Amino acid sequence: MKVIIEGKPAAPAPQVKTVCIDEDSSGQRVDNFLMRHLKGVPKTHIYRLIRSGEVRVNKGRVGADTRLNEGDLVRLPPVRISERVAEKAQAMAQGTARGVPARDFAVLLEDEHLLVINKPAGVAVHGGSGVSFGVIEQLRMARPQAKFLELVHRLDRETSGILLVAKKRSALKNLQDQFRERQTGKTYLAMVRGAWPAKLKVLDKPLHKYLLDGKDAQAGERRVKVVARDNADGMPSVTLVKVREQLPQGTLLEVTIKTGRTHQIRVHLASEGHPILGDDKYGDFDLNKTLAGAGAKPGLKRMFLHAWRLQFNHPVSGERLEILAELPSELSQFLSNPAPVRPSL
């Protein structure tokens, strides 16, 4: 019997598009504008399109650093994007057409310039491979009328708490500049193993990112480690620690980061011998299993790290804002458990 396997239908050929620059995109460089509108296209290809004259503004050739003005007409040449990006865009369009609701993110603050939500643990801020959706994709699906929604910063998938989203490009730039210039205040609540020394308040060991070797399921995953101060690959990193409460389960800390390195809090705390409870990358794995076991009451099935407080200046008014997100129920319930946590041997 002949079996015919149906292949994927050929994707429609990309078409030339003309985009009119609105007020929010005014002042943006051409290369940055293209990177936003041609997602999935490599940067090298975008710069090649600009140099070849295929990208035009008001029918004229431009350079990568040309600034766009409101009312400009930008010619976007026909460009094929990666299959993964195309699939995600199609899935988002289909979901929006069906009225698929986004996950219910608690809104802490919103106006015409920004949106602050309380992200649950276990949800990535960006979608992964295939057509899975992260926070930002779900927000865009839930708000199809929104012209602009972009993450200002990121949180690890396992971390809950405050996440800031810009609703205008001008707000995005202003807020990202504040993060870059360390004008913001980011404080987390973390529960660590054992009794944290109250005198240990500043952690400033350099950090270095690397990929795991080997052939197991974790091979190729990103990790971070503390390195010597004279290590050329070490990135300066500063974490401030304040003991909030000593408990039988461990120590509840207020942790403020002055730099935004990958996994900074997790690695800095673990390097002092006090890993975050429930951390599946840098934690006490045997202890984590005990905490998540059926006999643990109420138990801890996630990492105890929560983005609790965020301070920043409003991108338009300049008013200093302080946003607070209280601990989610699964963490507050664990705090109420007086049973001591015993480190694994």
Image: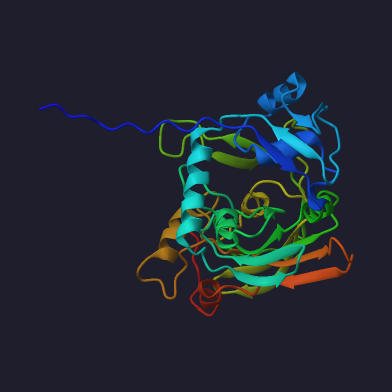
Residue 216 visible in this rendered orientation of the protein: yes
Residue projecting furthest to the right: 318
Residue 281 image position (x, y, % from top left): 53, 49
User: Image height check: is 272 above or below 27?
Assistant: below
Residue at horizontal 56 percent and vertical 39 percent from the top: 222
Residue at horizontal 84 percent and vertical 40 percent from the top: 68
Q: Which quadrant holds residue 185?
A: bottom right
Residue 99 image position (x, y, % from top left): 48, 63
If the image is split into quadrants, where does the N terminus sit?
Answer: top left
Residue 168 image position (x, y, % from top left): 76, 56
Residue projecting furthest to the front: 59
Q: Which quadrant holds residue 106?
A: bottom right
Residue 125 image position (x, y, % from top left): 59, 54
Residue 108 appears left or right of 221: right
Residue 180 appears left or right of 246: right
Residue 188 visible in this rendered orientation of the protein: no
Residue at horizontal 70 percent and vertical 64 percent from the top: 115
For the rendered model, the colour scheme is rainbow
Residue projecting furthest to the left: 1
Q: Which residue occupies the foreground of this view, 26 or 46? A: 26
Q: Which residue occupies the foreground of this view, 76 or 309? A: 76
User: Image height check: is 230 above or below 152?
Assistant: above
User: Image height check: is 220 above or below 281?
Assistant: above
Q: How many marks?
A: 0
Q: Which quadrant holds residue 299?
A: bottom left
